Image (cartoon, rainbow, N blue to C red):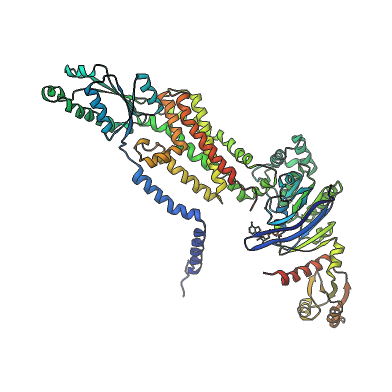
Amino acid sequence: MKKRIPLSFTRFWAIVIKEFIQMRRDRLTFGMIVGIPVVQLMLFGFAINGDPKHLPTALLLADSSQQGRSILSALKNSDYFSFVREVHSEAEGEAILAQGEVQFVVTIPENFSRTLLRGEKPVILVEADATDPSATGNAIASLRTVITTALQHDLTGPLAFLAGSDGPVNLRVHARYNPEGISQYNIVPGLMGVVLTMTMVMITGLAITRERERGTMENLLSMPTRPLEVLLGKIIPYIFVGYIQVSLILVAARFIFHVPMVGSIPLLLLSASVFIAANLAMGITFSTLAKNQLQAVQMTFFFFLPSLLLSGFMFPFRGMPDWAQVIGEVLPLTHFLRIIRGILLKGNGIEEVILQLWQIMLFATVVLAIGVKRYRRTLD
Amino acid sequence: MINNFAIDVRGMTKRFGEHTVVNGINLQVRRGEVYGFLGPNGSGKTTFIRMLCGLLAADAGEGTCLDFDVIRESEAIKRQVGYMTQRFSFYEDLSIAENLDFVARMYAVGDRREAVRDSIERLGLAGRQKQLAGELSGGWKQRLALAACLIHKPQLLLLDEPTAGVDPKARRDFWEQIHELAAQGLTFLITTHYMDEAERCDRLAYLSYGNLLTSGTAAEVIAGAQLATWSVSGPDLQGAARLLRETPGVRQAVAFGTSLHVSGTDAAGLERAITPYRREPYTVQQIHPGLEDVFIHLMESSKDNFAP
Ligand SMILES: Nc1ncnc2c1ncn2[C@@H]1O[C@H](COP(=O)(O)OP(=O)(O)O)[C@@H](O)[C@H]1O
Ligand SMILES: [Mg+2]
């Protein structure tokens, strides 16, 4: 008796061939199959740097002695610091730290040189933006070495004793905005941006393709409508969906993670609406480009991946190579992370927030313009 | 200049890649007329209608639809046209009332609530307005679609196979409504495969492989085909049909119920061909060809002329 074979090789092979042909014809899927591993390799292999260097630093030099200038030039030469500018008052230093223009402000106090030469360890104040604790740790550790080495050149001969065993100066570090270095303070607010990016882009990403696949597009197009009406009409309702997520995360941040909320919550909610709209615009534009729902989902993922990795959420922004930072600067999530961390942890106000917010608005406008241009008004 | 024609187009052409799906069609539909649009599946009816209301960009052609330029003014045309798609294309996850409300808003209908309420009542959908469109049977979906197409008081209705899959009673009701609306001045262009529906149209056009083969009133279409037809009844009509098809003078032999319709364009030749059946147990009779005889004839001859 012949055994029944549970699988017909002919049928199986027919399907294999069919799938191959379909895959080859579906350029986007094929692109994804190749693109995703390549992108991931690049991101994980090169972009991620747990030991950020060239952190922007400002110096407040209140004592223009030989020793003060030695420290300045040592900072300029150090790998960890990138000397951005000299500030002339505490307030100025405070402002650029809050805006995120610099990560550190180093203050060499008045009479630094005199105090040093008297053998009393002078205090060097380092104010660090510790919003993201992992970004500052190594740099601070190296600062002590940098300063000690710089002063060694000056403290030779009879002054050598001043170098002492534990260094000639007293380094006082103020870890600003997140003094305990609690990483949740950094991550939980950031998560709001990440979740919004993923879900908002996805929701509208399906909007147009779904109409097309269900056949309702033919009806919609037979009515007198303009592309922008359709696109905006599909964006607005989901802003409310976004606010549900915002509320959930804010409540969790406050009551579960006890994240400090220094700044204005209304300002945060306002900024969130812009950020949500930008992501919805991205999604709807994907939707006009995608041929079917699967493609729309793939595009969403393709957008989400760099947002997650290059925005400063997973890794300190300044630890990334320049090209990755350039990409990151384009992404709305990067700016939203600065806004939300700024408001909650630093107590940023409208002046600092607006510097990031306009970039999100610009992104949304450009992306929506592409969507309107690509929206097909016929079934061709 | 006010045009007597609701639709007056020339040379409408649409290509998909290599294929010319609509090939230089001229069509004139008078205002207030019910115009039947016939042809086998894939002959280009849907494509032609989509070009009329701007859903597809025509590759060639000119003319007017409701006095608007059919190529350049599709926005204006859309406002005055009700288009009922071949496949149900309202939102299945919206209720009847919500769908109608959506359409009324899209066309900015004045006094929207009343328009929606009226339309629900007129169509006898009153008890079901909360029901989801996706849960409706074919006949009810068709009623909903028609109601939605009428809500903005269009002047021209383009109905693409509106009665496909609808039961006979509902079809009859539907056609009664069409004629009532036509009497009020609405113009209809309706595609159908049903002969009884074709006969209810004021005028007809017949398409095949994207070509307009004939148009006019039913009588004109039949006369134009210059077809002679004989009806044959008796035993083993299938065998008779097989033999007849091979006989010179016979263009087609088609079973109609219990008789065979044998047609040809050469009346004398056809009469010679039929002669062997003028005896018991067969009965033979010359008849006036019907629309269906003519359409089958048109379709058969167009195969030879246009088949790719
Ligand atoms: N979007 C399209 N792309 C390519 N071919 C199409 C498209 N739409 C219709 N066709 C082809 O055009 C021909 C005419 O189709 P259609 O207008 O739907 O005919 P009908 O409505 O008379 O059945 C068919 O052969 C169909 O396959
Ligand atoms: Mg069709």
Residue A168 location, x and y as percent?
18, 23
- Residue A147 against residue A367 in the figure, above or below: above
Kindly identify the residue that appears in the image at 45 percent across and 23 percent down.
A263
Residue A176 location, x and y as percent?
35, 24
Numbered disc total: 0
Kindly identify the residue that appears in the image at 36 percent across and 39 percent down.
A320
Horizontal arrangement in the rendering, residue B215 relative to residue A272 (left or right):
right
> Toward which corner of the image does residue B114 lie, by quadrant?
top right
Kindly identify the residue that appears in the image at 67 percent across and 62 percent down.
B20
> Quarter holding the C terminus of chain B?
bottom right
Q: Is residue A280 visible?
A: no
- Residue B49 against residue B264 in the figure, above or below: above
Horizontal arrangement in the rendering, residue A14 relative to residue B157 (left or right):
left
- Residue A108 against residue A80 in the figure, above or below: above
* Residue furthest out toward the left: A158
Q: Is residue B148 visible?
A: yes
- Write down which quadrant ligand 2 falls in: bottom right
Horizontal arrangement in the rendering, residue A86 relative to residue B156 (left or right):
left
Residue B162 location, x and y as percent?
75, 53
> Toward which corner of the image does residue A319 lie, by quadrant?
top left
Residue B128 location, x and y as percent?
73, 42
* Residue furthest out toward the bottom: B276
- Residue A255 against residue A230 in the figure, above or below: above
